[in-house]
Image: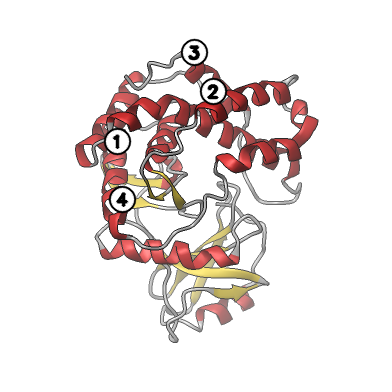
Amino acid sequence: MAVYTHVSAEALSAFLARYDVGALVSAKGIAEGVENSNYLVETTQDRFILTLYEKRVAADDLPFFMALLDHLAARGLPVPPAIKDREGREIQQLEGRPACLIRFLPGVSLSHPTPAQACAAAEAMGRMHRAVANFAETRVNSMGIATWRPLLERCGTDINTIAPGLFDRVVAALDAVEATWPATLPTSAIHADLFPDNVLMLGNGVTGLIDFYFACTDLRAYDVAVMHTSWLFDGRGENPDAAIGRALLDGYTAIHPLLPEERAALPVLARGACIRFLLSRAWDWIHTPADALVTRKDPLAYLRRLDWYEANPEAFA
């Protein structure tokens, strides 16, 4: 989450008037993340999240995201569907951006999850994968493996300003991942970004799975690998916690068992996930506007993860 587009109180009040949600009391920008502009909105009736979709989220993709959230919410998953206005519309326009008013979920995202919390979050992912077994909508992964080399080429040697030699390092890692990518594994709708900050918890219980704006149709096991790369390490991409790793796999497989070929593919899927997030963070690091209210994320935290997975191919054994 972030704030790129500023919304005036007058524009927000007019926006809220389309809904039966009460009058505006307050609105505060949310700085975490890098994708969209987000505000915590309080009205005389409740609290909501207002999201304005910025350039990386294509307006044509929003119906898929909304349909997926509605599908999961109808099956009891703790996700935040968009609120419909009086005419039944979920997707609006505000300050020249597509925008949605989204149900507020309680809970906090964790900087240092415990194994019990990691297990609960992985169980929630397993339930999500079970719930989408009959979800008919599809969306190509806009940050899938086919996009990584073009993104690296767009970053070019500017990426070496982050770390000397980084361009050549990523080229070598990408060559190896592309050569062994398991493209025939089972696919489904996946979250594709289930970091700890996209899971809300109270104690050891999951109260929300949020930020589905990279959700797509892709390898189901890749979703598990993305989660592993983001939960196993500290914020610098260091100090991997083996207990967290075991808890993630135990929690997920208790709900949705992995096929043998899926488990065997996890090492290369994890290295691919590291490349994906390293590159998107590098692009944002180079190109984020100086005046944006946004928290940039360190690309090298994913280089350190990549180094670790290359040195520890047995991590998923």
Give the spatial CA distance, label 2 vs label 4.
27 Å
Q: Is residue 95 left or right of residue 223?
A: right
- Crowd around label 4: few <14 · some 14–19 · many ≥20 (10 Å): many
- Comes first in the chain, label 2 or label 1: 1
Residue holding disc 4: 128
> Mark 4 belongs to which amino acid?
Met
Q: Element at badge 4?
A: helix
> Mark 3 belongs to which amino acid?
Ala
- Comes first in the chain, label 3 or label 4: 4
Q: Are marks 1 and 3 in contact (CB under 8 Å)?
A: no
Q: Specify the farthest residue to the left.
A: 254
Q: Element at badge 3?
A: helix
Residue holding disc 3: 311
- Please say if 57 is above or below 283: below
- Comes first in the chain, label 2 or label 4: 4
Q: Residue at x 24, y 30 (%)?
A: 250
Image coordinates for residue 188, horizontal then vertical, percent: 37, 50
